[in-house]
Image: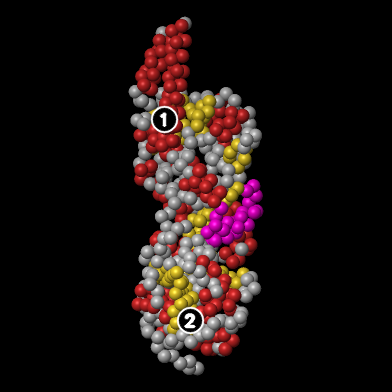
Amino acid sequence: MERTDISIIIPIHEIDEKTKPLLGNAIKSIYDQLVKPDEIIFVIPKNSTGIELAINECVNDSIKFNIVKNDGETDFCSQMNFGVNNVKTKYFSWIEIDDEFSKIWIKNAVEYITAYPEVGVFLPLIVDVTETGAFISFTNEAVWANEFSEELGVLDMNALLTYQNFNIDGMVMDVETYKEFGGLKSKMVLTFIYEFLLRLVHNDVKIMSLPRFGYKHVNQRTGGLFNTYKNTLTPDETKWWLAQAKKEYYFNHDRVITYNK
Amino acid sequence: MEENKVKENALKLIEKLDNKDFGFYFFTLDTKGNPTGGVAHIYQQVKLLIEYGYNAYILHEDVDYHGVSDWLGKEYAELPHVAIKAQNHEISNHDFIIIPEVFANVMEQWKNIPAKKIVLSQSYDYILELLNIGASWGLYGINDVITTTQNQADYIKTLFPNINTYIIPVSIPDYFKCSDKPKKPIISIVSRDQKEAVKIVKSFYLQYPMYKWITFKELRGIPKKEFAKALGESCLTIWVDEIAGFGTAPIESIECDTPVIGVIPKMIPEWMEDKNEEGSVILKNNGVWTNNTLNIPELIGQYLKVWFEDSVPETLLKSIENSKGKYTEDIQRIKLKEVFDTLVLKRKDEINTLIKNIDNK
């Protein structure tokens, strides 16, 4: 089997009866890849119970896997950063426990990495679906619209400042670039993805949306991170965090931020 | 005494033909800088004939002819041109004038010019456009036609049974090739009627609002190399040209590995048709062919889905691969030499027959 130099990270905070079969589907979507990644890295909290068991029920030896235990903060961003620190390949991708890759994703990522070596981040075309699997919309597609950004398919600052609906689910990214620019910031509530993209573009990292259905994302799953934000943050708070992202991207390190009306 | 003079002239004519001391004059419309496949094909023939040591010219009406430098480039723009209105170039009986099929009026006006006249028919649909009822090319002293496909030659024979037909296929330049980068979600549209293209785009966006970010590029009026680059980058080409004689754009797209959704023309192009075991005509799978423009948006939607899923059917891709490389410049070059050498030989035969008749008297 040829090496792809891509690892896939699955950050897991907790598992319950509802999310366990979803995790099984997410893992299966990795094993179903037409071109296999080199390794799967499961990031779990150190003192968790049941997660390792649930993982072991779904994995096999056809792809090398590693379960790493995080004894620090276990919010999503911290789990991701911890996972990236354990990657041994040049690139990583990642998947949420309730989502699925399409089987062509790694194959296409490899092709695009070869064709566009100057690109630092490859975003998949995300198909957003409801919990029952009904199509809602696409994400990351806008950069392919005529005159949306300066270069067709590439996310730039002007585009990002006027339109925020981009998602890093499933992205394939160079590990060193991720580390160099500080990774995800756990202090950024709600808009940590937006701030991350702004920061990368600000630092001249080229971000390209790969025109292939690479990732199926369950939108606003009950109990999911963004669903929780949606139910707990007021519209004013949402606006405030958006504005905050536009200020914080100048800093590569995670600074303490306190919401202030 | 008169006959001796005729014989002497005939012998001079033979000598000129033997020494290639004559010209092929290709009558060409001034497109005012607008790219057209038909004119490009004419320029290509002039270029190749010159390479073979013939004198070949673009013959145009006005002195202020716009030329083709904007869209075909310097190489073609600098080919020899002759303006009829400049009246500084004499066309004689040892020359050949090649007239596009549409200009039946010009054929009529020039019926008494002593030069050998040949029709160049690239689009069968234009043949009758300016031809008077009851008239025929034979009436204008024309007995030879060069066309691009056997299907067109067969059709011309049904109109003018006594005409001699010759086929010089279209050639696709080698800069029509797949982009070295992965294809982009851009759809190229090539249509004879601009309104048709606009309707397709509008209906597609209405039927598939989730794909409103897909870019359509109408490839009209752009230089040939830019046209080729756009085809190479696109993931799909839409082609609507019901009266196409050869259907160059889809073959150009195929050379770029870009699948085509197209309307089946009235005269099925040779590269699109095949014969089954019973000998009946069937369509090849080298594109998605339909007889109805109304379902093109739906076909685009279906194609995009499989393209985004990276699952374009293997049968389509294989058939596209098999259709490539059939219309190279080398093939055209060989065929062109064969046809024009034959036309010169035939002209010599005609004159030799004349000389023999004089000698036999």
State the residue position of label 2: A44
Residue B199 to residue A232: above or below: above
Residue range of the region highlighted in magenta in the rendering: B290-313
**Residue under the point 51% across and 85% down:** A48
Q: Chain of mark 1?
A: B
Q: CA distance from mark 1 to mark 2?
A: 75 Å
Query: Is residue B290 found left or right of B68 in the rendered image?
Result: right
- Is the image coloured rainbow, by chain, by secondary structure, or in one colour? secondary structure
Amino acid tagged 1: Lys
Residue B185 to residue B67: above or below: below
Q: Secondary structure at mark 2?
A: strand
Query: Is residue A134 found left or right of A62 in the rendered image?
Result: right
State the residue position of label 1: B337
Q: Nearer the viewer, residue A124 or A71?
A: A71
Q: Chain of mark 2?
A: A
Residue B54 bears which disc, if any?
A: none
Query: Is residue B281 found left or right of A119 in the rendered image?
Result: right
